[in-house]
Amino acid sequence: SDPALPDPFRPILEKLLAKQVDSRYQRAGDVLRDLQPILSEAVTVETPATRESFLQAARLVGRDDELGQLTQALGRTYEGQGSAWLVAGESGVGKSRLLDEIRIRALTSDALVLRTQATETAGHPYAVWQAAIRRLILVAEMNELEASVIKFIVPDLAALLDRAVGDAPPLRPDAAHARLQTAVRNLFRRHAILQPIVLLVDDVQWAGQESIQLLRSLTQLASKIPLLILVTIRDDEGAEIMAQLAQLKLIKLQRLTDAAISELSESMIGQAGRQPEVVRLLQQETEGNPLFLVEVVRALAEEAGRLDQIGVRPLPSSILTGGLQRLVTRRINIVPAADRELLHFAAVAGKVIDPRLLAEAFPDRAIDSWITTCVNASLLTFDDERLHFTHQKIREGILVTLEPEQRRQLHGQVAQALGQAYPDFMLYAAQLAHHWYESGDGAKAALYAAIAGDQALRIGVYTEARQLYELAIDALSQLPPAIENHEQLIDTTVRLGRIAALMPSDKLPDYLQRALDAATELGDETRLAAVYGSIGTFHYVAGRIPQAFNYFGRALVLGEKLGLERLLLQPYNMMGRALCAVGKFRQASDMLYDGIELARALDENLLLASSLPYYAATFAFLGNYEGSRPHANEALARARAMGHQSQLAATLVTLGHYHTFCGQFEKAIDYLQEVLLMRNDLLRPQVRYEAHGCLG
């Protein structure tokens, strides 16, 4: 023995060095407990930071089968056979936690891991792809054309590459959309040959249709290259998108069983976590939701003083009285009152935290210190160099605490700071529109929504364009009557009408009536003609041909009177199709010829693609089968290039009728069956009925 060692320490040291394992201390906390009485200074057995580390480092439990499936998929990816998986489940059930396990395994196996997340308030049509593409372009090779195309997704591409990046050559919207998808696919394909890629996409239920199309495109590529795609979705909010991603292999996460709850509890608390009364309380309070379970254990530890005291002291009868919101409120209260203003601002701004935005809004505050405080309170976390709320439920819990007027003011502050932090507002127009709208500033909301809608329309992102135009019209409707507001309402409604045949809007009838009233009140014949054309198109798409003729006729009269070709564009094309539908093929052919020529001249490719199959049909119905063929081929090629199922289906049905009339039954059957194999949610019912009818 060492005579210099004070007697009180000898038993502790001897126990630490005991030859028999069972004779040694089993837990560090027991050592600290025995040291406490003989030290002059207090020993902190557990701090909030060490407690949090135990909670965050808890083992993944109850997911052995799912983890095994994805681990095998990762292994096959290294062998050159990628795959795509959709992990579905309720909020808090552990979808992202499962992906974290695969992410760690992929990183330690030298894969390139790309992680991104969709958000409710995305400010860009392809916002969900920005984080992943930004990471990929730092290691992948790109030619100048590809860089100019990718710049639309990553606006600061030139700064990232440290070289000038020109603008992509202008193309029609559908072609630009297809070019962008091709460029992204080529990036993934080329780099995956050099290094396996694991793409993780969280919360895809909030992704726009164009982002979903890009995901589906990459999914088709995955099986041919070393690319593993893992996507998470809240199945209670994303049923429609789940249907669109049916080609992905589905993993449905259920809540934890009692055995898994016991295992997870032990990994956080220790042996006491398996006590029946502890497991019973956790099951009662959380029903097996892992997020709630961790929150309940955190609350129990705060009440007991330490994790290892849970189960030693009497357990409360209930923790979640008041629901998860009560636990979120407790966590918020850890943050000093002076810092909660920033927390509220950040919650309104979105799930991902933008330090630049915070610094602009709060120039006198120490943002780094605030971030540290919120991370220590488990409100924020870092993931792949991104700072975000630890869970969407935490952010939602903060938002619930805000009064309506307080939330409106915060949206205004976010919009103001966003405009100042990023002067090139074109890149953030959609975000600005959202925040100004929520703040109650209809004029600014309408301005930015229309700008963002035009951007989306130019590149063929029609779903996003429709949503933004609807937001602009709703914002304008809140403003007092004024000439400028009326004009903007009419113009935006007409632009919405141009894409409504491809992306139907339930709100369009009401919008069209408002636009008609506004144009009539202004006495503006140019705008009135445009509204007439939009109303005619609406009736035509709905199958009300007489009403369509009525409004197209009015538009033609005014368009010819004013001598404005653009005003004749829609009536010529839509009336030509209507005439074809009612069997007046000679008149239809003449009208469609004029409409198609105008569409080519004015670069209106959506109208052009929609009119070509009808034009081809008029030739066939008039007996000129050879003359119809080039127009039919162009119609189908354009429809496929656009990448929109509804447009392709309408074209295939029209060509199905055309080939049936020509006696080319095998080709007609092929086209019609292709329509019937498309998913119901992507087609208008009328198109499917026509396909069934013609096939019969």
Image: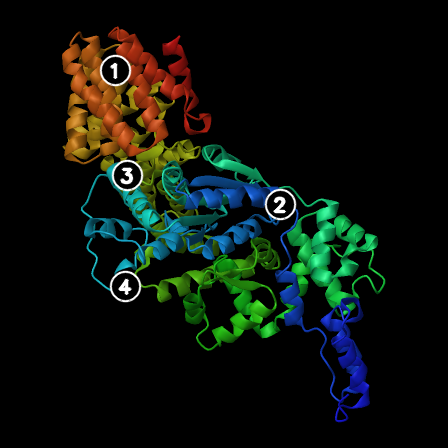
Neighbour tally class for label 3: few under 14, some 14-19, many 20 plus, Cα within 10 Å: some
Instruction: Work out how far the residue at label 3 is from the one at label 2, CA to CA, in angstroms.
Output: 40 Å
**608 in relation to 93, above or below:** above
Residue 402 in which image quadrant: bottom right
Give the spatial CA distance, label 4 vs label 2: 43 Å
Assign the N terminus to one quadrant of the image: bottom right
Tell me which amino acid carries mark 1.
Leu
**Residue 648 pos. (x, y %):** 32, 26
Residue for badge 4: 159
**Foreground pick, 342 / 171:** 171
**In this view, the mark in front (4 or 1):** 4
Q: What amino acid type should be assigned to the residue bearing mark 3?
A: Ala
590 vs 422, left or right, is: left
- Give me the disc on residue 579: 1
Nearer the viewer's eye, disc 2 or disc 1? 2
**Discs 3, 4 touching: Cβ within 8 Å:** no
Q: Is residue 97 left or right of residue 676?
A: right
Q: Which residue is mark 3?
A: 178
Q: Quadrant of the C terminus?
A: top left
Secondary element under disc 3, as helix, strand or loop, is helix
